[in-house]
Image: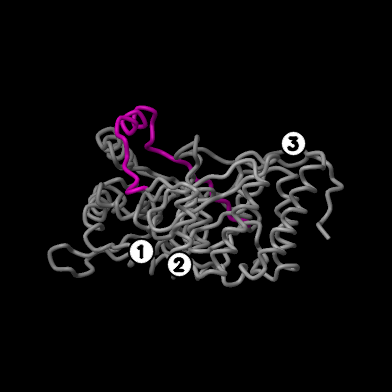
Amino acid sequence: MPQVYIVGDDGQTVAMERIQCKNEDAELQQLLENNHNLLPGDQINPEDPRRWLLVRREMPVEDPGSGDSRWSVDLLFADQSGTPTFVECKRFLDTRSRREVVAQMLEYAANGHYYWTSDLLRRYASESAEKHGMDIEEAVRSVTADETESVDDYLESMVNNLREGQVRLVFFLEEAPHELRSIVDFLNKQMERSEVLIIEAKQYRIDGVRVVVPSLFGYTEEARRVKRTITLTQGNRKTWTESAFLDDARRRLDGKNFNAVETLIRFLKSHSSESKLGKGTRAGSMSFSLPRFGSKSVISVFSDGLLTLPFGGLSGDPSVERFRDELAEVALNQLGLNVPEDYRQRYPSTEVAEWGPKVQTLTELIGRLVHQHSAAPADDPSDGPCS
């Protein structure tokens, strides 16, 4: 078993103590429930790292014969594509982490679609989001990022993927036994629509600090080639145009609120470098980016009047982050919109009833910010808050 070392300032190494999990609930399930990034999305898909929405811990799976809750999945996640991701946690010393747990996972994947409706998934995902201080709209937006689709469309994609068998099965262990590795390797080469993965979450301790090192096993390049031969369905999608978006907004909203949406859309089109239309089936959406920020969306508007500020996606570049912080200040202090304290990781949304009456002020302040950031050099540290 490889040893892990800490290298001190003096160049000397200190070995970290390897921890063996004793409490599966606290040391694996609860750990993953509170730290979704321990599912290494960048290792699963390096070109488009996976992001995770927690649907529920201990997700019940009904027996299709009786309708009774016969099983439960340790954790059910979904990624930004709406791919259901079943996660089963097992300690290395638990001998069930071999053939029995594989059979369990296949039963979950085969039977989940019988009773998991979009309404049920919404209820469970809403409960999970609330535990982390978010509502379901924001939780989904934090996963889909620039993908402008409604919560209903996203959940419908999950249901369609379940029915088509387009799922991901993950064994989350501190260490995987050889027998389980062999089974997973074999299944991954045979299954075209589903992924079967092992994530080893080796754990260490030094000076009272616990360290977790997640690593992916089971997704070889040969397995990736097998998956590429199938074109995966993403559920029904609608091709929107700007006129169709406005027609849908006019149908949904009263006169004042529709005028607010139309005013904001026209303004954003005249000040953005790119506008992107969503493909949702239940509501239209448009997202807008600025010339200096590439394809990063800075604001999204839905045909039901919802306004989303994607702060969580505006990072990685100093000029982008300055704009994000100034936009948050404007939204909170000058418009009175809801901006959470940890907004840098959030995607807050506001109903048109709240922002619509302030649309003129909103456009003026955004216009000032856009002008300021268009005129300043990309790395000018003097960019200050908008006054």
Residue position for label 2: 128
Residue position for label 3: 11
Outermost residue, left side:
65
Q: Nearer the viewer, mark 2 or mark 3?
A: 2
Q: Can the viewer see residue 254 in this picture?
A: yes
- Quadrant housing residue 90: bottom left
Residue position for label 1: 121
- Dot 3 or dot 1, earlier in sequence: 3
Q: Which quadrant: the C terminus?
A: bottom right
Tell me which amino acid carries mark 1. Answer: Leu
Tell me which amino acid carries mark 2. Answer: Ser
Image location (x, y in percent) of residue 100: 24, 52
Q: Is residue 197 above or below residue 150?
A: above
Which region of the structure is painted magenta? 209-237
For the residue labelled by badge 2, is the local secondary structure a helix, a strand or a loop? helix
Outermost residue, right side:
382
Residue placed most toward the observer, 58 or 380: 380
Tell me which amino acid carries mark 3. Answer: Gly
- Quadrant housing residue 336: bottom right
Q: Can the viewer see residue 21 in this picture?
A: no
Q: Residues within 10 Å of mark 2 (few under 14, many from 20)?
A: many
Q: Is residue 107 magenta?
A: no
Image location (x, y in percent) of residue 107: 22, 54
Q: Nearer the viewer, mark 2 or mark 1?
A: 1
Q: Is residue 223 magenta?
A: yes
- Dot 2 or dot 3, earlier in sequence: 3
